[in-house]
Structures are given as C-alpha cells and as structure tokens.
Amino acid sequence: MNPLEPLGRVVGGAGDRVARAAAARVPGADLDERDPEYIADRLTEAWLIASLYFRAEVRGIERVPETGPVLLVGNHTGGNLSPETMTITLAFVSYFGAERPFYQLAHNLVLSFPGLGFLRKFGTVAASRENARKALRAGAAVLVFPGGDWEVHRPSWEGDKIDFGGRKGFLRLALEENVPIVPVVTIGGQETALFLTRGDKLARLLRLDRLFRLKVLPINISLPWVLDIGDMVPRIPLPAKITSEVLDPIDLREMFGPEPDLDKAYDHVTGLMQAKLSELAAERRFPILG
C-alpha cells in the first residue's frame, strides 16, 4: 500500500464537504449579470493599474471580427491570478465598447472564491460547454482557455510553451456553433511567481479531479508566503510585463472542409499559437522586465 493513501482518504473525505460547499457558491451562467455600465465606469482605472503594474500590452485586437459571435482561444498563464484574462478583457472593451457582449470562462473555484463576485459584472461565467454555447448563441464573443489548470500552473521555465494537454473541446464548440476561432497568445504570466511544479500526482492521490475538477496541486514561490501550495490564497504577483497578441480569425470549415479532422485542426491552431509565443519570447530580454 502507498503510505500516502490513508492521508488521501482523510483529505478526500474533508474535500467532499469543501467541494459541496464550493459548488453551492458557483453561480449559473446568468449572462445578464454582465454590467456594461459598471465596466465603463471602471475601465480607466483598471487599465491604469494594468498598464502601470504589468505594463500590459495587447496587440492586434482589431483582428477580432467586428460583429457576431466569436470564440477567442487563449493560452493560460500566471496561476490562479491569470492576469491576461483581465488585460484581454480590458483591451476588448476599450476597442469595441462595453456594450458589445464579451464573456470569459473561469474555473468554478475562481467564481466561488470570496471577494471575486465583481468578476461576474465583467462577464466571467463558470467554464462549461453549456455556458459557452449559451453566450455564443446570444451573439457574444467568448474567451476560453483550453489548457485550463494544467497549462496555467506549468513550471516557469515552460512559460514559452503552448500546452492545452490535447484538449479539443474548443474545436468541437466552434464547429457546433459555426463560429470563427481567434487565437490570443500571451507571455509574461509565468514570471509573476516562480512556478515549480503542477503537483499532478499529488492531486490524483487526493482525488482533487473528482472533487474540484482540478488535475493539479501546484507549488510556487511567491510573495508574501514564499512557499505556496495550491495557489488558493491571495498572493502578490511580481510585476512582470504581460504581452498578448491577437491572431487572425480561423474558419475551421473553410480551412479543413465541411467535416474537419480535429487532430489536424488542433495541430494547426496550437502550431500557430506556438510560433507566435516563440516570437514573443524572443522579444523578451530579461525575466519580469520583458
């Protein structure tokens, strides 16, 4: 017997109770919670903070189609803080206006965390195919991160790698809803802390996937806690420069025919994103400073 299995059972039992409590806090996909007036009122100060602290730069936002539903597909960075989620949202709203509906999919635990309810006013909804489909059918632009918790907690020395973990659900969603994919590539988030390991083996032992839909129990070195296990308590991100670039829209059927091969489409989309991420990495002269 693995000597850690008894610990896993004990933690798992406690986790069942925590999972039920967290699930009860997760709101449904009420698209009406997005508040354009709230966003417009806070846009200037939010951009100021992002610009001063992260020196945020989002290039090519004009490549997003001007009207209609669209699926923005991003690589995930920076642990649970994920600064690119907000900087991309701010760039989108600045360019297209707060009235154009724009939603971001986030992990259930993010939405259930105390003090983050304001994210729903910016358009953040729980990550699920049903919620994404609902938003797209309402004519909205939707931002998804296929790599999820697996990619966002990758080690800092893998910050220049796209890693969706083979997940192709975003391709099926785009085909089912007949919407274009717009890749968005970000670098810098893995420099907001020193991410050491995903902790995927420990997560399996503790049954976090079943309890919380978490495949990882990450470990990072960050302020003020120094050693941070789980990335679930508030921390101070290092002021790394965050740079994102929006790529040209991709019509999967136009490119791959009426019944696209998902493996080929996946390799194409992630290949384009990896090439751009490598370019952005080559521009950076120093960690954090950019």
Image (cartoon, rainbow, N blue to C red):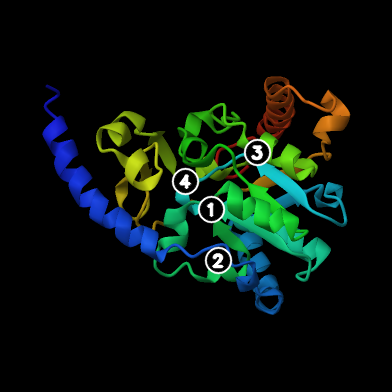
Q: Residues within 10 Å of mark 4 (few under 14, many from 20)?
A: many
Q: Alpha-carbon distance for marks 2 and 3? A: 22 Å
Mark toward the start of the polypeptide (1 vs 2): 1
Q: Foreground residue, 234 or 36?
A: 36
Above/below status of 64 relative to 279: below
Q: Alpha-carbon distance for marks 3 and 1? A: 14 Å
Mark toward the start of the polypeptide (2 vs 3): 2
Q: Residues within 10 Å of mark 1 (few under 14, many from 20)?
A: many
Which residue in the protein does label 4 denote? 79
The amino acid marked with disc number 2 is Leu
Which residue in the protein does label 2 denote? 119
Which residue in the protein does label 3 denote? 170
Residue 44: image quadrant is bottom right
Q: Is residue 217 visible?
A: no
Q: Residues within 10 Å of mark 3 (few under 14, many from 20)?
A: some
Q: Alpha-carbon distance for marks 4 and 3? A: 21 Å
Whether label 1 touches label 2, CB < 8 Å: yes
Tell me the residue at 72%/46% (across/down). 72
The amino acid marked with disc number 3 is Phe
Tell me the residue at 47%/34% (across/down). 154
Q: Nearer the viewer, mark 4 or mark 3?
A: 3
Q: Position of residue 22 (x, y in %)?
A: 35, 59
Q: Nearer the viewer, mark 3 or mark 1?
A: 3
Which residue in the protein does label 1 denote? 106
Q: Foreground residue, 206 or 96?
A: 206
Mark toward the start of the polypeptide (4 vs 3): 4
Q: Position of residue 35 (x, y in %)?
A: 66, 75
